[in-house]
Amino acid sequence: MTSRRSVAYFWDPEVGNFHYGVSHPMKPHRLAVTHSLVFYYGLHNKMKVFRPYHASRQDMCRFHSEEYIDFLQKVTPQNIQAFNKSLSHFNVGEDCPVFDGLFDFCSRYTGASLEGAVRLNNKSCDIAINWSGGLHHAKKYEASGFCYVNDIVIAILELLKYHQRVLYIDIDIHHGDGVQEAFYLSDRVMTVSFHKFGNYFFPGTGDMYEIGAESGRYYSVNVPLKEGIDDNSYFNTFKPVITAVMEFYQPTCIVLQCGADSLAGDRLGCFQLSIKGHGECVKFVKSLNVPLLVLGGGGYTVRNVSRCWTYETSLLVDEPISSEIPYNEYFEYFAPDFNLHPDVSKRQDNANSKQYLEAIVKATTENLKCLTHAPSVQIQDVPEDFFRLQVEEEDAMNEMLEKEKKTRVDPLNEYYDDDQDKEMEIDDPTEVPKVNILQSDVNVLS
Ligand SMILES: [Zn+2]
């Protein structure tokens, strides 16, 4: 069941240096802390580490509208006044602020998910990990819920060049609305989201009656949960739903969004999952032995997000790690216990009764039985990959990390270099992908 699989891990040393704003709960810095733990646990030795591709505006426009991406590319905190009208039009402002290097940030996290998809497509790995991705709320024409560019949809479109059926699983506490909406009319992608629903919890969608429409009817699966769900209740719902999905849909590739705001003690969340409980879902999906793209997502208590994604990295590379956190540049974040698996402090009761969860599993399974077929389309005239993989860079990054380990001194900090943040990525014209999108790409978008 747990055969060792080849894992590609994307790490952009700059991606943790972006700032949404002082009081904003989304902290890209959590990515730097996660990487530090992964690195000091030595997990980079168990996978191929890549400095990811930067997505171009053309890549982003495979899903998003040109005018929205134009806006993201042009707006800065300095010129924001000139875009007054556009701000509300594109839902940019409070939740999704304009910050220094915004487009560059999007380009980096999206590029890593896209490269993950390409590497899975050409079988250069079995599992691809991009903790900086998973921004599931972004819509075709607008930003939403701290998300600007939907790297997940863009990666799935790439996977569809080679894969008949892609399964998307979302364990963030929020409904994976942006991804569901993108593929709502399609049977080529099944979206399955487990999330808190009710009492106006963001984004407000994800009722179990949202099942897809037209060709996509029964290909959207929603598991609405109430606050306080614990490890056992969650996994006892997750496992039978995913087992039924696998049986009826038979995906050839899986994308797993691992939002860590479903953990107990999250700044915005209200579930009671432990890191092991969250990881159990990742372990289970890995055991299905289907090519797998693993992404991050929400997660607003930085120390727990980094613990969680580090633990899940260890599960994905099949390398058990000690619960004692190794010394690293953010060591003090993990006080007082310095443990990878902190106690789950019980803040609230589990509002999900056994009967409620059983009823959801039953209804979901009944819907899946309505699937007439696992769709199969003829895939031909596959367009060229959007960039040529630089195979020689593979070992360089691993080697560089090893050298860095020898010379690394404390403490790195979260201050950022102003000049660097203002630098915009200028796309190398040789890297511009072909824009001939497969017919199927067009069909799957609503
Ligand atoms: Zn979330």
Image (cartoon, rainbow, N blue to C red):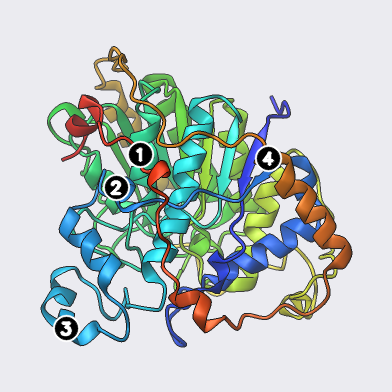
The answer to which of marks 1 and 4 sits earlier in the sequence is 4
Q: Which residue is mark 2?
A: 58
Q: Name the mark on residue 433.
A: 1
Q: Which residue is mark 3?
A: 82
Which residue does the image show at 73% across and 29% down from the upper left? 4
The answer to which of marks 4 and 2 sits earlier in the sequence is 2
Q: Nearer the viewer, residue 39 or 52?
A: 52
Marks 3 and 4: in contact by CB < 8 Å?
no
- Type of the residue with mark 1: Pro
Q: Nearer the viewer, residue 216 or 85?
A: 85
Residue 302 placed where, x, y %?
59, 72
- Type of the residue with mark 4: Glu
Q: CA distance from mark 2 to mark 3?
A: 24 Å
Please give left or right for residue 168 compared with residue 6 in the image: left
- Residue at disc 4, secondary structure: helix
Q: Quadrant of residue 426?
A: bottom left
How crowded pointer 3 is (Cα within 10 Å; few <14, some 14-19, many 20+) is rated as: few
Q: Which residue is mark 4?
A: 394
The vertical placement of 438 against 168, above or below, is above
How crowded pointer 2 is (Cα within 10 Å; few <14, some 14-19, many 20+) is rated as: some
The answer to which of marks 1 and 2 sits earlier in the sequence is 2
- Type of the residue with mark 2: Gln
Q: Nearer the viewer, residue 52 or 229?
A: 52
Residue 74 placed where, x, y %?
26, 70
- Residue at disc 1, secondary structure: loop
Quadrant of image for the C terminus: top left
Residue 183 placed where, x, y %?
24, 38
Marks 2 and 1: in contact by CB < 8 Å?
yes
